[in-house]
Amino acid sequence: VNRDILHVDMDAFFAQVEQRANPALEGRPVFVVGRPGKARTVVAAASYEAKRLGVKSGMNLPEAKALCPAAVLVPADTSKYVDISERIFQELQAFSPQVEAASVDEFYLDMTLTAARWGGPLVVARDIKKKVLDLFRLTCSVGVAPNKLLAKWAAGRNKPDGLTVVRPEDVAEALERLPVSALAGIGPELRGTLRTLGVLTCGELARHSVGELTAHFGVLGYKLSAMGRGEDHAPVAFASQEERPKSVGHTQTLPRDVKDAESLHTWVFLQAERVGARLRKKRLAAHTITLILRESSFVNWSPQKRWRLPTHDGREIFQRAWSLFPEKLRGRPLRLVGVSAGDLVEDRQLPLSPDDQKQRRLEEVKDKINNTFGSFTLLPARLKGVK
DNA sequence: TCTGGGGTCCTAGGACCC
DNA sequence: TCTGGGGTCCTAGGACCC
């Protein structure tokens, strides 16, 4: 039941990539942000020079600047990070076929059957760190443990550039006084409810009555109890069974709250066009469309519907999304709009009417131009001046 | 000039079918 | 003069992650 699991966690990934790409940023505090200079923007990633001053991912810009006035703001270049992430993933496959990308900057490897060939999991961990540094000039932190839950926790213990091993015989003692929220999967809500039960640490969670946990959390109670003991049976996927994404979406916090239907229409249309373009690029189409809305009060809405015919056409996605707009919200100020496409299928066999086929060829030409010259070089007339 | 944007997973309840 | 139970699909929405 104990495996040799490695968690590879890139250190301040976006910020580090930007520092390597621009020597002027080396050694300086860097904020990678979505839209520099715009209202309502947050820090997507902070370099360690800024993190040491207390800046965290997700922090709003005024707060982050107050902590670190010297920071250099760099706009996020997501496709660059995705590209490097994919190349790291390729390199990791040399160590084990059982390697999984948990996010753009995190990977799990199951070395149970393969570590011996390389001299054991600790040697593998060192080799991986060296390889990532040599090939990409990037540091990462690695955790070695009997399962994914503990490997992820271990990787976070000595950041940046860390290497932490958790042996099975040390688990109980290591978790005894650990706050429950130190484990991935226990966020603010669960932590709060657990506190009302008198459970603050993993040790207390492990000893708590499973009956009471399931009474409060349902089936999640069993999982929480296991987490308190540091148990986790989730397998690491194989690189060969790479799955198609489950959803593709775009949301945007608007420069200022919007309540008139005309502007709203335009903003939702922009998100729908973005989603359509990405679906077509991936050769996917969606059965389910979700309209995502956030009121200025931060109340969220996400009406969704499944259609029998999948689509990847921006206009059609917009029509479907717009049809979901809740009556109750008409005229109420909204701060965020988004469109998400789910229930995805490959688009090869999309049934198309002759009109659709003409439209499809037009879209393909448009996509080609946009893919070559940048997104939204060509876009519907109604979006002019919006983006 | 408070609180981003990309996702995954899970639960619950109702409709519907057998 | 009485309405079970299992399976699946659909939708809403929350929690959590980086």
Image (tube, coloured by chain):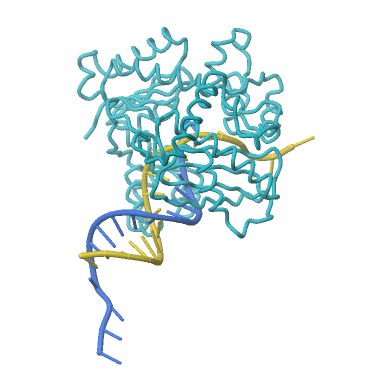
Chain colours: A cyan, B yellow, C blue
Residue A9 in the image: x percent, y percent? 43, 24
Residue drawn at x 47%, y 46% as measured from the top left: A289
Residue A244 in view here: yes
Residue A252 in the image: x percent, y percent? 60, 38
Callout count: 0
In this image, A295 relative to A146: left or right? Answer: right
In this image, A143 relative to A113: left or right? Answer: right
**Quarter where residue A42 is shown:** top right
Q: Is residue A228 above or below residue A323?
A: above
**Quarter where residue A153 is shown:** top left
Query: For the view shown, which residue lies furthest in the front direction?
Result: A354
User: Which of A88/A286 is in front?
Assistant: A286
User: Which of A2/A368 is in front?
Assistant: A368
Residue drawn at x 39%, y 14% as measured from the top left: A129
Residue A215 in the image: x percent, y percent? 37, 60
**Quarter where residue A77 is shown:** top right
Q: Is residue A86 above or below residue A297?
A: above
Q: Is residue A372 above or below residue A293?
A: above
In this image, A193 relative to A383: left or right? Answer: left
Residue A182 in view here: no
Residue A120 in the image: x percent, y percent? 25, 17
**Picture quarter with the C terminus of chain A:** top right
**Picture quarter with the N terminus of chain A:** top left
User: Which of A63/A254 is in front?
Assistant: A254
